[in-house]
Image (cartoon, grey):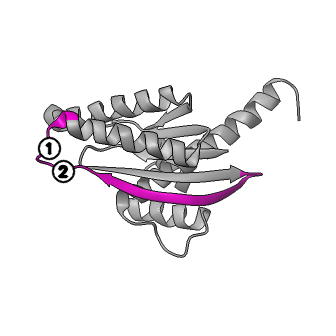
Amino acid sequence: MTILGIDPGLASLGWGIVQSEGGRLTHLAHGVLTTAPKSPPEERLLFLYNEISHLIELYHPEQAAVEKLYFMKNVTSGLPVAEVRGVLLLALAQARLVVGQYDPTQIKSSVVGAGHADKGQVQEMVRLLLGLASIPKPDHAADALAVAVCHVHRVQVNSVLEKYAHGKR
């Protein structure tokens, strides 16, 4: 299974591609999409939509995972991220991908085992779980890989639970 993980943002959107096969995780690619702050919001959203669609065509993921919008001190700063999430969810739905959405506590808990882990702990675990020589950079890309790893773990747990629920051990 190939998963596209996304850390949404209007200025910087992190993405990561992870493959899960037989319980083993493999890093395929990661990066960040950046938009020009002075460009109109609709152009920035269109750019992100087109680039995510291109990544889907390039890597053919079967599933995707997106970090949820979790806290807004200021509604004005949270609205652009909500708009980005809408555009992303549209692109993922058009590609007919199964989509998981996770809040930061779920991601940290799944990757590190503690919902209040700090960013450095999460990044180091991503590095270890994916067998990378160094922590992926930039931070938004590492966060996107963590979202993808979280999704793999959640899918694996749900699969085990379904087997037990149907009496298959």
Q: SS of the residue at dot 2?
A: loop
Looking at the picture, how far across and down is residue 11, in whole percent? 23, 49
Question: Is residue 30 a member of the stretch shown in magenta?
Answer: yes
Amino acid on which disc 2 is placed:
Ala
Can residue 72 be seen in this snapshot?
A: no
**Residue 28 picture location, percent across and down:** 58, 59
Q: Quadrant of the C terminus?
A: top right
Res 97 visible? yes
Crowding at dot 2, Cα within 10 Å, few <14 / some 14-19 / many 20+, comes out as few
Residue occupying image coordinates x 18% and y 50%: 36
- x, y (%) of residue 71? 28, 37
Q: Please tell me how crowded label 1 is: few (under 14), some (14-19), or many (20+) other residues with Cα within 10 Å.
A: few
Instruction: Report the Cα–Cα distance between label 1 and label 2.
Output: 5 Å
The extreme bottom residue here reads 133
Q: Amino acid type of disc 1?
A: Ser
Q: Could you say which quadrant of the image residue 151 lies in?
A: top right
Q: Residue at x 81, y 31 (%)?
A: 163
Give, as a single range, the part of the protein colored magenta. 21-42
Residue 141 falls in image quadrant: bottom left
| Residue for badge 2 | 36
State the quadrant of the N terminus. top right
Q: Are marks 1 and 2 in contact (CB under 8 Å)?
A: yes
- Name the residue located 27 percent from the left edge and 31 percent from the top edge: 83
Give left or right: position of 15 versus 87: right
Which residue: 21% across, 32% down? 79
Is residue 76 on the magenta stretch? no
What residue did someone put label 1 on? 39
Q: Secondary structure at mark 1?
A: loop
